[in-house]
Image: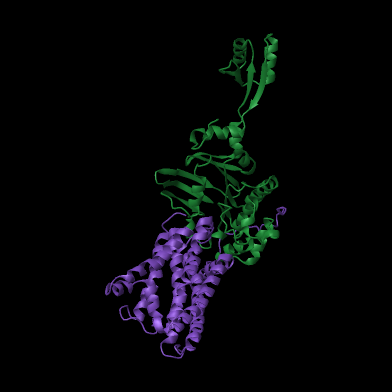
Amino acid sequence: MIEVDGLTKRFGPVTAVDGLSFTVRPGHVTGFLGPNGAGKTTTMRVILGLDAPTSGRATIGGRRYDGLIRPLREVGSLLDATALHGGRTAWMHLLSVAQSNGIPKTRATEVLRLTGLEGIARRRAGGFSLGMKQRLGIAAALLGDPPVLMFDEPVNGLDPEGIHWIRGFFKALAAEGRTVLVSSHLMSEMAQTADHLVIIGRGRLLADVSTADLIESSARRDVLLRSPRAGELAGLITARGGAVKPQDDGALVVTGLDAAAIGDLAAAHGLAVHALVPRQASLEDAYLDLTEENTDYRGGTR
Amino acid sequence: MTAPTRLSPTDVPNEPASSHPVPSLLTRAADLVASEWTKFRSVRSTYWTLLVALVTPVGFSALVAVAFANAPAAGGPPPDPLLPEVLSLEYAVISVSVLGVLGFSAEYSTGLIRTTFTAAPRRRAVLAAKAVVLGAVTLAAGELVAFASFFLSQAVLAGHHQGVSLSRPGVPGAVLAAGILLCVCALLGLALGSIIRHTAGGIVATLAVIVLPSILGLLPAPWSGRVGRFTLLDAARQVAALHPATNLFAPGLSLLVLLAWPAAALALAAVLITRRDT
């Protein structure tokens, strides 16, 4: 279990994390979502004792990270897969990490097999693709067979097969009762991997919900309707219990009645309909709605 | 890329660990030293810098001895028969300083330091483990160079009847003391690499700390001695001399000065290492 409590981290005038509180529970894959610069990596660094919080605290199983003895047996983490010495072989890298926590060599061999890296263990990590480096980082995180796992943007650089593999891997780890926290800036990715979502923007908590609940709440269905006699149709729809929201371009957005009912209604009254489009908001839309106000870096086209 | 292994239920051991017996402090220290030793021996820069540190001074000592022996009219015999060996050791200072700086700067520049500190959140223990590994290797290298240079230069000087033997009182101690120089410079580099966190900056700072104070030795007497006695290189020459200079500290005190440089730098590194974010 990871607990973040009133966490604030400032870098000079910049507040990267602002009074953030959330709990990550075992047995689930928890997605840690937010736009770039939202404070995900900073939060993870504070949890791992790499950065000191300005105020608040983060604990793992009730203890501060720097109080853990042989921490790799408690928490496995991957922050930056490219953080390797390019001249060192994958095997030597893993061995040095294992030795620091008294983990036997046999386990290093085992995690190489788990991540499909046995074939390249004796090669220098500098020549690895990003996907191979991600696998090596995941191998290192698994060394201590820890009950808590944290991954920062682990999908970056993986090919489709690798992404498929990693999703199953996270789910399998969570199914064993482990706590798994995975960050991403892509809602579509997390929707397929995570059971629970912690969404932040500008260092603040925006949502702490189960993925199912977010889908439920965001599943607003409506129908886009265009008609030369929109005014009359609007009256009929309202009379039937539907809600009508006129758009700037003259179209109507109808909720409460489905497309078939609207079409029948129009036909019954001999009113022409030019367009009748059932629409469903995606999870991505819900995420964008949430984070829109809380994005630091935004492209000019949105 | 190799095909990923499909995860079957037996692949990942069940029952996530919750409690482990707490290993003793000594076991944990040994673990960290083993880890740092693996890192140290698994990159090529270690071998290149050590090769340069070993080969350059040994060859150089013979050349210096030849120069001393063949120029009796101009400069007379060497002021100290052990000087060629000490001078040659100074030519290994640069490469062991680089080796020391890289101990931390290579980890900071790649980001590997975060893996290191995540695996070992007690950062001072990491500093200590790196110092043990680097110190042991550079001490061994320094003594190897010191004795090899001694025998080579004395062999040359002996041909001109200017050599001294290892059995002469004071000689073994002086040669042993000379061998410390490389370890001192490497540890100074390690500390400054940890403080500056940047390879080029760390190397410049280390060499500046070693070399620049020696300029003060060029001050007019008696200030050359009054200030020079505190500099790292003059202290090293003093402990390694058969006939110590009279205007500097005695060899015993000079040895303390020599050790104080890396000790002070490591102390500062130990203070800063826990205070800064990575």
Q: Is residue B133 above or below residue A7?
A: below
Name of the residue lying farthest toward the top: A270
Task: Tell me if I can see residue A169 in this picture.
Answer: yes
- Residue A42 at x, y = what percent? 49, 48
Q: Residue visible at 43% across and 47% down?
A: A9
Residue at screen point 35% across, 68% down: B215
**Would residue B252 appear left or right of B65 to someone viewing this image?**
left
Q: How far across and how far down the image is residue A65, in percent?
A: 49, 56
Residue A115 position (above or below residue A284): below
- A162 vs B104, nearest the viewer: B104
Q: Residue furthest left?
A: B222
Q: Where B254 falls versus B194 (above or below)?
A: below
User: Where does residue B124 sit, x and y in percent of width and height?
Assistant: 45, 64
User: Tag count in the figure?
Assistant: 0
Q: Colour of chain B?
A: purple
Toward which corner of the image does residue B208 lie, by quadrant?
bottom left
**Color style of the picture:** by chain
Q: Quadrant of residue B184?
A: bottom left
Q: Residue B80, can we see it? A: no
Q: Position of residue A230 (x, y in %)?
A: 61, 12
- Viewer-proximal residue among B271 and B86: B86
Chain green in the figure, letter: A
Q: Is residue A31 left or right of residue A276?
A: left
Closer-to-camera residue (B34/A47): B34
